[in-house]
Amino acid sequence: MKLLENKVVLITGASRGIGKAIAEECVHQGAKVVFTYVSSDEKARALEAELTQHGGTAKGYKSDASKFDDAQKLVDDVVAEFGTIDVLVNNAGITRDTLLMRMTEEQWDEVINTNLKSAFNLTKAVQKPMLKARSGSIINMSSVVGVKGNAGQSNYAASKAGLIGFTKSIAAELGSRNIRCNAIAPGFIETEMTEVLDQKVVQEWRNAIPLKRGGTPLDVANVTVFLASDMSAYVTGQTIHVCGGMLM
């Protein structure tokens, strides 16, 4: 039996990189995957086709997780179609990097709304079906930057640190109902976004990591599957660093 057999997994921001790898691995492990997107219908349909080509179940919903009403409607629509939601992966995230002296209010608000408020919106909405089932796993995608901070990323660091505090609080609130909440803090993960960087700089980053490589989206996806599955039934309120030892 596969680790996520028949579980309904809702993932925000699954169109590329880490989110896409999570969606692929969840389908591979038997889950029915629901993902959100905000722009291209064409790309969403292509991802649906890719995820279902070997007989899996996947469906994309156009929804902005940073908007409270959109999140509630999304959960209502998913429950109406799939019956419940077993796992929520709050993965949607953006960066608007710049030094504080140059950062605009809009750049601050945009990052906080997408990275942090979206987790509040979806977690609040998904409580209802999870409480009814007396079961569930909520996984928030934080970052090592949320643990240690980083110059030029005060908005991003604040949003990711906020997710860790949010995770611990929700774990405490919902644990008695058998609903778990954990966070993942990826380090340097190599995606299509890092391919455009100076490769000498990238190699220097790799050399500074104890495992001497950047992470892959699959590295993060594997930990996500563990936290989504019953293998982690006694794990809640934790932040798991997937960083090759960058942070110890």
Image: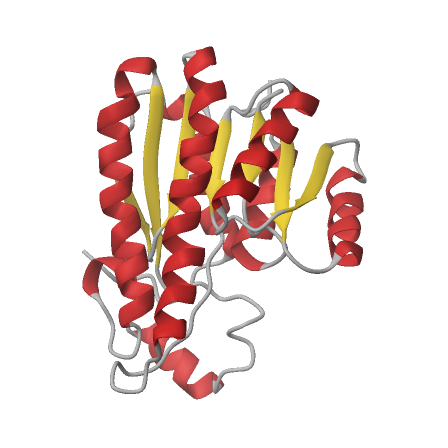
Location of residue 3 in the rendering, given as x and y in whole percent from the top left corner: 53, 25
Horizontal relation, residue 97 to residue 52: left or right: left
Q: In this orientation, does residue 10 appear? A: yes
Q: In this orientation, does residue 237 appear? A: no
Task: Tell me if residue 126 comes above or below residue 184 in the rendering.
Answer: above
Horizontal relation, residue 169 to residue 138: left or right: left
Q: Residue placed at 39% from the left, 50% from the top?
A: 117
Front-lying residue, 12 or 17 = 12
Q: Hey, which quadrant is residue 232 in on the image?
A: top left
Location of residue 36 in the rendering, given as x and y in whole percent from the top left corner: 62, 46
Q: Quadrant of the N terminus?
A: top right
Horizontal relation, residue 126 to residue 153: left or right: right
Task: Tell me if residue 246 comes above or below residue 75 in the rendering.
Answer: below
Q: Residue placed at 74% from the left, 32% from the top?
A: 56
Q: Residue placed at 40% from the left, 33% from the top?
A: 124
Farthest residue to the front: give it. 69
